[in-house]
Image (tube, rainbow, N blue to C red):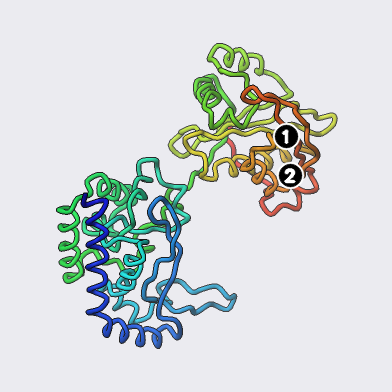
Amino acid sequence: MYKHFFKRFFDCLISLTVLVVLLPVLIIVAIINAIAVSGNPFFLQARPGKNSRVFKVIKFKSMNDEKDTSGKLLPDTERLTKFGHLLRITSIDELPQLYNVLKGNMSLIGPRPLFVQYLPFYTQRESKRHLVRPGITGLAQIKGRNNLDWNERLELDVKYVETLSLSNDAKIFFKTFFNVLTRKDIVVIPGEKHDALNTCREVKLKARKFKRADIQTRVDWINNPRVNNTMPFDLPATVKRTTEWFKNNIGNQTRIDLTFTDRQNNIMAMGGYTHIDLKDSKAEFYVMVNPDSQGKGIGKKATKWLLNYAFLTYDLNKIYLYTYSMNNAANRIYESYSFKLEGVLRKHAFKNGNLCDRRIYGLLREEWEKAPWRVTDIEYDF
């Protein structure tokens, strides 16, 4: 009952009361801040809310917009105004978010709304933080705020969602007042304490040749709908058939199969080239991503690595591939890497029992040489 009705009722009642009572103070703060930052005293930024729907969070601006000689914004520490510093250590910069609460974008208590670019980097469990409205304060804020590392902070957000109740919200509400008054766990420049989540969790790929120990993983991936819906595999894949496939490929000069791992040696992607034809200077390319890690840019990274490796190692003139016409995500990736659509094979391949169109994409060496992501040397573990 509290979660579905009274929480929202208390949000509106308390935020409206506070806004009315503090309105004269907020007006004075806005005027002083407009002078301090030489412009708009408010700061709007896109943040994901409940169900990951993006909204504009509003705060008092604490930094000016000064730039260096090249037109880039100066570092945060140089742009933070003296008044902005005061706003941050007193948490007054957060008060305009009461307007977000009244609009229904936020709640008084809940996981803090983080950056939109963080969305692909949450684990499945951590994504539960978006099952409720984000809050001005929350469990993570009273347990350490920005002093916590990302794993601790996001786990506390999930714990809040799983234990949401009136008594817990009341404890967080009053604990927040205590922390603000004592300035506990205040970090004026959060980026100086911890790297951004997307930086911390960015996957660094290392390539090696496919080996026998990878067979079970390949079988599991091929049998996963998130992979086999986009690639022409014989289903179901089995360890026996895949082992035979592996044995037949040993010493095969017309193909190479690679495995990409992260820093913890987890397998993140597989790919390679089939039909390598050095006489005609071309090869067919393929890549597939760990189904549990799709949407995190791994496919793009593996694709870029494979294309660079192919042109550098084999001195090819062309890389080509086939995709299903409805595989829009993959087609966008290939087009972003300068692949050109060469034709469509109508009703060319079976998928889920139906004949589907397949696209033929090609990338010429001359296009690769002009690409901004082209490299002249790449690392690999074989």
Q: Foreground: 270 or 344? A: 344
Left or right: 260 in relation to 136: right
**Residue found 47% across the figure and 35% down from its top:** 292
User: In terms of image quadrants, where is residue 354?
Assistant: top right
Q: Which x, y percent locates residue 234? A: 62, 19
Q: Is residue 377 above or below residue 104?
A: above
The residue where tag 1 is placed is 321
Question: Sequence order check: which comes first, mark 2 or mark 1?
Answer: 1
Left or right: 142 in relation to 359: left
Q: Foreground: 281 or 135? A: 135
Number of numbered tags placed on the structure image: 2
**Residue found 75% across the figure and 39% down from its top:** 361
**Residue found 66% across the figure and 51% down from its top:** 373
Q: Which x, y percent locates residue 190? A: 35, 64
Q: Which x, y percent locates residue 222? A: 56, 25
Quadrant into which the C terminus falls: top right
Label drawn at residue 339: 2
Q: Quote the CA–CA distance across marks 2 and 1.
A: 9 Å
User: In terms of image quadrants, where is residue 192?
Assistant: bottom left
Q: Mark 2: give few (<14), some (14-19) or many (20+) Cα within 10 Å.
A: many
Left or right: 338 in relation to 197: right
**Residue found 14% across the figure and 53% down from its top:** 167
Kind of residue indicated by mark 1: Leu
Kind of residue indicated by mark 2: Phe
Left or right: 237 in relation to 102: right
- Asked whether the residues under the numbered discs 2 and 1 touch, taking CB atoms below 8 Å apart as contact, a structural biologist would say yes
Q: Foreground: 162 or 268? A: 162
